[in-house]
Amino acid sequence: MYIRRPNFVPFIAVSLFPLLALSGCHRDPNVRKQKYLESGERYEKNGKQREAVIQFSNAIKIDRNFAEAHYQLGKLYLDMGAPQAAYPELLAAVDLKPTDLAARLTLGQLQMGGGLPDKAKEQAEAILAAQPNNADGHALLAQIAVRQGQTDEARKQIQQALAIDPNRSEFHVTLAAIEGGAQKDMPAAQAELQKAISLDSKNGQAHMMMAALLEQDGKPQDAVQQVQAAADAQPKSLVFRENLVNAYMHAGNKQGAELELRKIANDFPDDKTGATLLSAYYLQTGQIGAADSAYESLTSAHPKSVPIKAAYARILLLEGQKDKATKVVAELVKSNPNDPEVAILNGSLLAVNGKVNEAADVIHKAVKDAPDNAELQMALGKVSMQQGDFNAAQTAYGEALRLAPRNLEAATGVATIADRKHDYGTLLQVAEKTIAIAPGFPSGYVWRATAEANQNETAKAEQDFQTALQKDPNNQPALVELAQIRLAQKHVPEATSLLTKALQANPNSVEALHALVAIDLNAKQPTVAVDRINQQIARSPKNPILYSMLAGLKLNLKDFPGARDAAGKALQLNPGDENAVQQQADAAVGMGDAGAAVNIWQTWVNAHPADGQGITMLGMVQESKGDKSAAMESYKKALQLKPDNAIANNNLAFLMVDSGQSADDALTYAQDARRALPKSPQTADTLAWVYFHLGRYASARDLLEDAVKVNPNDASVQYHLGMTYSQLGDKANASAHLKKAVAIGNGSPAAKQAGDALAKLM
């Protein structure tokens, strides 16, 4: 049954009109953009800057010509310390609304600070054209005049500003800068600053300028009070807090500086600079133990702070506490797997543990995700260097320098590789650019001098090395390189003095120590050379490179037990030092214990199964022990990892024909080795011996004749050439080369085989 409800329809009709009206408001772009603007202003007022950026940006998306939104967004970007993002917004605000004098003022101040005084002047003049008594316009002109060195004009403009508004604290600061700058009228400057502070006790700039004047007057304690006032007035300003630390240090109050640094780390746990200032202080003052303790506490207080945990991990790595560092880095990787700094730390830890290839994989992945991160590119350069891939390292360092042109560490990476590759054109180029942007950085002059020295411009090189030493009298590379010039000039005493100074400045200066040891050995004083290295070890007992140097020297002196012990110490300090493994194995061979050498390399290969070079070395010591079968297996494994391994190809081919295996199969390996090392007498000998077994005696002879010219005292080459001439029917040459092999072979297998062949030939 149908029931009428007469009051129902009117109710709906009445209620619907407000809803329609409301819906219309939501569709009105002018209403929507205004709401976004107001929402952004509320967020900004409450300190939520990122949310405010989103709302202002939403307003602009609705109306690209919304001048007020552009202005508010530009101001916000400035407050966030992003002037490059602010600039186009402020330009748009002024272009869209030329009568907005506040926008013009903000734009002009940004242009002046950004080195565009002429552009800033246009804004100031436009402001004053609209409002001749605009105090801010006159103040902006005063600041521009100061920048351009027009002191009288600057004073005139700021005094006009003060006449209009005498109670503006920042105007008095500008006048103080004029009086204390060009005029050097410190009492007048101080009076203006006192006035500025009396008008606004939270004017941080006034306090900082007052502190600078007090510092000049020799009143560091009073200066500390002024910087403290600036920091108290703006406690969220990291710049003022850093200046307070510096003020404490200038006043000799290290305790105050340390306490403030602890407060900064605690107050700015999520700011990388704030979180790491304390660690930098401890490292500079040699208090790494205190740094460990401090950051352990900070990590407990701020368990979610990536910068603090990262700083703690770096400290642990420096201390060699790999287990604790592993735990901290694992936590970071778990909670922040995509953070570039976490990837860098993870890569560093892997590299320290000898897992360089794994470290490279981690950094490569991070770089792929964030290719414009200069620090990641730097990390990629470092790990590529550790892998020995200098081309990849050069590319990464170059990219880091492109992203951060003033990054001196990136410039150092580019220069280091250019020097290593003898690319003196690139070295000179990076040196010139570095000197231009950082004339006080001594390494720039060292790089330029190195390029000049290698281009036979010795006089220029000497001058640049001297310039580097003027800027840093203990600059180790400059001292060492200048010493090399003196050695070339036969000025050995002066060279020795320079090298000794380099070692005194840096006990870990391997280059200086190498050069001094070479001087000792050249003077036939090996005992002095050994003593010299031991002295440096006493000064730097945890440097594995020094023990490796000692092992190398003792190997040359045939002190095999001493070499074994020194190499063992190097490995204790750096388990990833493959050179020390090589030295240990060489010492074992020297002591007549090839089995021990095999065990040494087998242990290394077990720990580093992807190290083709290590597997090749294992094959070589197995071969020296007489275990040809095991050696061939090792060479094959090495070639599976790197098919163009010249040594593995060469040795495998030789063993195959020497043990009666297929010469046809051996030919491929021998040819690959020869292509890789076309000038090597060893690859020529091996390929010739394969040709010999294939019956290609003329080809074998040609290769062996070339090899014997390069290395006439190789018994194996002489034996093979004698056998080849024998097959060619040339008994005279065959006899001559076989006799030579017997004479120089000292009872080696090649000498014995040559003797047997000679007996049959006779």
Image (cartoon, rainbow, N blue to C red):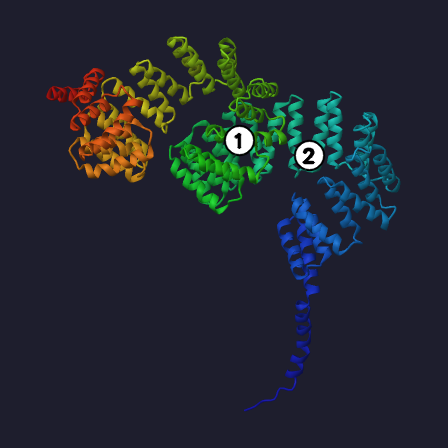
The residue wearing badge 2 is 231
Q: Earlier in the sequence, mark 1 or mark 2?
A: 2
* Residue at (71% x, 59% y) in the render: 65
Q: Secondary structure at mark 2?
A: helix
Under circle 1, the secondary element is helix
Snapshot quadrant of residue 686:
top left
Q: Which residue is mark 1?
A: 425
The residue nearer to you, when weighing 114 against 634, is 634
**Residue mark closest to the camera, 1 vs 2:** 1
Q: Is residue 38 above or below residue 418?
A: below
Task: Report whether residue 82 is seen.
Answer: yes
Count residues near mark 2 (Cα–Cα under 10 Å), then give few for <14, some for 14-19, many for 20+: many
Specify the amino acid type for callout 1.
Gly
Q: Residues within 10 Å of mark 1 (few under 14, many from 20)?
A: some
Amino acid of disc 2: Ala
The residue lying toward the viewer, choosing from 318 and 686, is 686
Quadrant of the image occupied by residue 137? top right
Left or right of 239 on screen, residue 290? left
Seen from this angle, which residue lies furthest bottom? 1
**Is 447 on the left or on the right of 600, as rendered?**
right
- Residue 440: give x, y in percent of width and height: 62, 25
Q: Are marks 1 and 2 in contact (CB under 8 Å)?
A: no
Cα distance in 3D space between marks 1 and 2: 49 Å
Task: State the image coordinates of residue 424 (x, y, percent, origin top left).
Answer: 51, 29
Nearer-the-camera pick, 116 or 666: 666
Q: Which quadrant, please, contains the C terminus?
A: top left
* Image quadrant where residue 576 sits: top left
Horizontally, is 97 left or right of 671 in the view?
right
> Residue 41 in the image: x percent, y percent?
69, 53
Query: Left or right: where does residue 576 sit relative to residue 128?
Result: left
Q: Which mark is residue 645?
A: none
